[in-house]
Image (cartoon, rainbow, N blue to C red):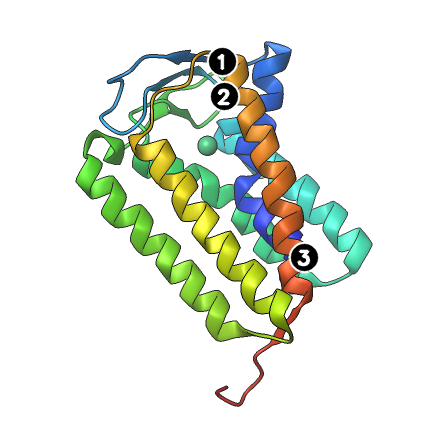
Amino acid sequence: MAALLTAPMLADLLWPVFLLAGWEQVRIDPGNTRFTPLDFVSYPWSHSLLMLALWATAFAGVYLAAVRYWPGAIAIWFGVVSHWVLDWVTHRPDMPLLPDGARYGLGLWNSVAGTIMVEVAMFAAGVWIYLRATRAEDRIGRWALAAYVILLMIGYAGNAFGAPPDNVSQIAWSGILAAVILIPWAWWFDRHRAAAGDKNR
Ligand SMILES: [Zn+2]
């Protein structure tokens, strides 16, 4: 579960580190799109399609060497690359194919209502799929998951309607903090849930 969750988040886990290192740039620019106050000036290493394919291959390779489970490695590879596809849908044209190539984006974030409808629907679908595929074995499996879903919804509302961040290091550190909390947390409740199996339960 931790690996499966890390995969689609990987671009946004590398990004704060690269921001702090000064390798990538973001600017706080309220109104850049209607939904986000961020202007993604440059993020060739964390967000170009080519680099994400390489990160995906590296991550899936490490996973395969450690766990020797091909379906999991394939899911991880597509999970990492899916970040580019989904950011391409939401971002204005700032998503590079190659680290220094042309940049693309459909700009869903120009519509607040459209963004919230699509993102909430995808989140609900993800939760529904996970609830269908697993069942709680104990109270942690039930309530740590429920608290997780609620926290993600609160965090999303804060992102959508809260004040823009004060500075870039705040963006970077809150991203790192979120990952450090959310990934182990998901690993924790997932250990207290079992595969649902063939019977409908
Ligand atoms: Zn991203």
Q: Which structural element holds mark 1? A: helix
Q: Amino acid at mark 2?
A: Ile
**Marks 2 and 1 close (CB-CB < 8 Å):** yes
Which residue does the numbered mark 3 point to in the structure image? 188
Q: Amino acid at mark 3?
A: Trp
Placement of 49 over or under 29, stated as above or below: below
Q: Which structural element holds mark 2? A: helix
Q: Nearer the viewer, residue 17 or 153?
A: 153
Q: Nearer the viewer, residue 101 or 22?
A: 22
Determine the residue located farthest toward the right in the rendered image.
66
Which residue does the numbered mark 1 point to in the structure image? 168
Mark 3: few/some/many CA within 10 Å (<14, 14-19, 20+): some
Residue drawn at point x = 27 percent, y = 18 percent? 32
- The numbered mark at residue 31 is none
Which residue does the numbered mark 2 point to in the structure image? 171
Mark 2: few/some/many CA within 10 Å (<14, 14-19, 20+): some
Q: Is residue 188 visible?
A: yes
Mark 1: few/some/many CA within 10 Å (<14, 14-19, 20+): some
Q: Nearer the viewer, residue 187 or 49?
A: 187
Determine the residue located farthest toward the bottom in the rendered image.
199
Asked if ligand 1 lies within 8 A of label 1, the reply is: no
What is the C-alpha distance between the residues marked 2 and 3? 26 Å
User: Where residue 31 sits in the image (x, y, percent)?
Assistant: 24, 18
Placement of 109 over or under 140, stated as above or below: above
Between disc 3 and disc 1, whose residue precedes?
1
Horizontal side of 80 relative to 112 (left or right) equals right
Horizontal side of 81 relative to 6 (left or right) equals left
Residue drawn at point x = 56 percent, y = 68 percent? 142
